[in-house]
Image (cartoon, rainbow, N blue to C red):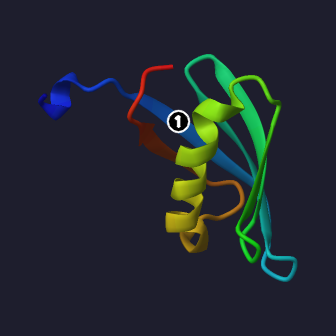
Amino acid sequence: MSSKYLPKTTAYVRITQQSWQQGQMEGEVRAAEYEWRFKWHFRQGQLLVQPSLGRALIYEPLGRFLERSDYQLEPGGDYEFTLRSQL
């Protein structure tokens, strides 16, 4: 199957707070009609996502995005990544 036929959804991420001393980052992510808040404790590799509605849809892809990009993300910044599913 060609990649142009695979389902996809764009997720939009906004970083609201970041503390290198505490080893954490907070933000918001939205995809389709869903919106979540997250806390990424990057020293422990722990990701918390709220609310629980639809959390299973975003948890793994958001975690991969944060692990790959955390040192490049800044508070107030807007970012995006693509989910290989349609929400």
Q: Position of residue 15 (x, y in %)?
A: 70, 53
Q: Is residue 50 above or below residue 4?
A: below
Q: Residue at x 85, y 83 (%)?
A: 21
Could you tell me the amino acid type at mark 1?
Ala
Residue 73 location, quadrant: bottom right
- Identity of the residue furthest to the bottom in this view: 21
Q: Residue at x 64, y 43 (%)?
A: 59
**Quadrant location, the N terminus:** top left
Left or right of 39, for residue 60: left
Q: Is residue 15 above or below residue 3?
A: below
Left or right of 34, for residue 10: left
Left or right of 80, for residue 21: right
Q: Which residue is mark 1?
A: 11
Q: Position of residue 32 (x, y in %)?
A: 55, 20
Marks counted in the figure total 1
Q: Residue at x 19, y 22 (%)?
A: 5
Residue 36 location, quadrant: top right
Left or right of 51, for residue 6: left
Q: Position of residue 31 (x, y in %)?
A: 57, 28
Label 1, secondary structure: give it: strand
- Identity of the residue furthest to the right in this view: 22
Q: Is residue 25 above or below residue 27?
A: below
Few, some or many C-alpha atoms within 10 Å of disc 1 (few <14, some 14-19, many ≥20)?
some
Asked whether 36 or 76 is in front, the reply is: 36
Q: Is residue 34 above or below residue 80?
A: above
